[in-house]
Image (tube, grey):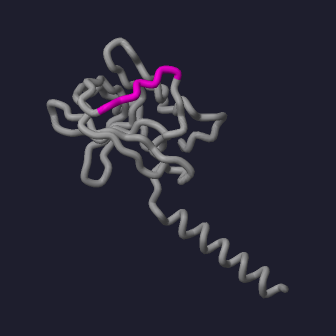
């Protein structure tokens, strides 16, 4: 019986360690208020990737700007903002967010996305706190 408990404990720890080593990024930890910028452009593509917590998909888009393409992190797929823009390729957007560098690309952690007069709020521009955050559990150190 002791052998089974030790074996299952080691196996569980190994699984936890391997999940942590997958290199997931909690995008909220990368948001820096001092790098907030506005980008205007046309949506080239939309996609989803595994979120930092590994429990949801994270929506993103590629925005074609006058300075080149920018990869824009939007929100978890499960988050439904008060104003949801239902973004499509060829939409013209103005996006305010924190400019960051990821390996091989310029990226933006979106705080606000505007199409015409409609604004989708995703994060607090000054702090980066996600609109979907509950309590202090929003992955920012």
> Residue furthest toward the right?
1
Q: Is residue 136 left or right of residue 112?
A: right
- Taken as a whole, is the magenta stretch helix, strand or loop? loop
> Residue furthest toward the top?
117
Q: Nearer the viewer, residue 19 or 87?
A: 87
Q: Is residue 31 left or right of residue 43?
A: right
> Residue furthest toward the left?
66
Task: From this view, report whether residue 105 is shown above or below residue 90.
Answer: below
Q: Is residue 90 left or right of residue 119?
A: left
Task: From this view, report whether residue 88 is shown above or below residue 53.
Answer: above
Q: Is residue 83 magenta?
A: yes
Q: Nearer the viewer, residue 60 or 111?
A: 60
Instruction: Name the quarter where the N terminus is drawn.
Output: bottom right
Which quarter of the figure has residue 116?
top left
| Range of magenta residues | 82-88
Residue 16: give x, y in percent of width and height: 61, 67
Total number of numbered discs in the rendering: 0
Q: Nearer the viewer, residue 4 or 96?
A: 4
Task: From this view, report whether residue 48 is shown above or below residue 40.
Answer: below
Residue at the location (39% across, 37% down)?
109
Residue at the location (67% across, 72% down)?
12
Residue at the location (55% across, 51% down)?
53
Residue 58: give x, y in percent of width and height: 45, 44
Q: Is residue 17 magenta?
A: no
Instruction: Name the quarter where the C terminus is drawn.
Output: top right
Residue 123: give x, y in percent of width and height: 48, 29
Q: Is residue 114 left or right of residue 16?
A: left
Residue 38: give x, y in percent of width and height: 29, 25
Residue at the location (33% across, 20% down)?
115
């Amino acid at each position: 019986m002791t052998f089974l408990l030790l074996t299952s404990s080691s196996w569980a720890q190994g699984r936890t360690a391997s999940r942590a080593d997958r290199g997931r990024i909690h995008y909220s930890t990368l948001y820096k208020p001092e790098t907030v910028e506005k980008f205007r452009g046309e949506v080239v593509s939309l996609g989803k990737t595994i979120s930092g917590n590994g429990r949801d998909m994270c929506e993103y888009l590629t925005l074609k700007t006058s300075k080149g393409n920018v990869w824009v992190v939007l929100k978890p797929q499960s988050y439904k903002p008060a104003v949801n823009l239902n973004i499509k390729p060829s939409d013209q957007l103005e996006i305010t967010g924190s400019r960051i560098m990821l390996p091989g690309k310029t990226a933006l952690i979106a705080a606000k996305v505007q199409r015409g007069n409609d604004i989708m709020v995703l994060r607090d521009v000054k702090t980066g706190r996600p609109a979907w955050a509950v309590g202090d559990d929003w992955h920012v150190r």
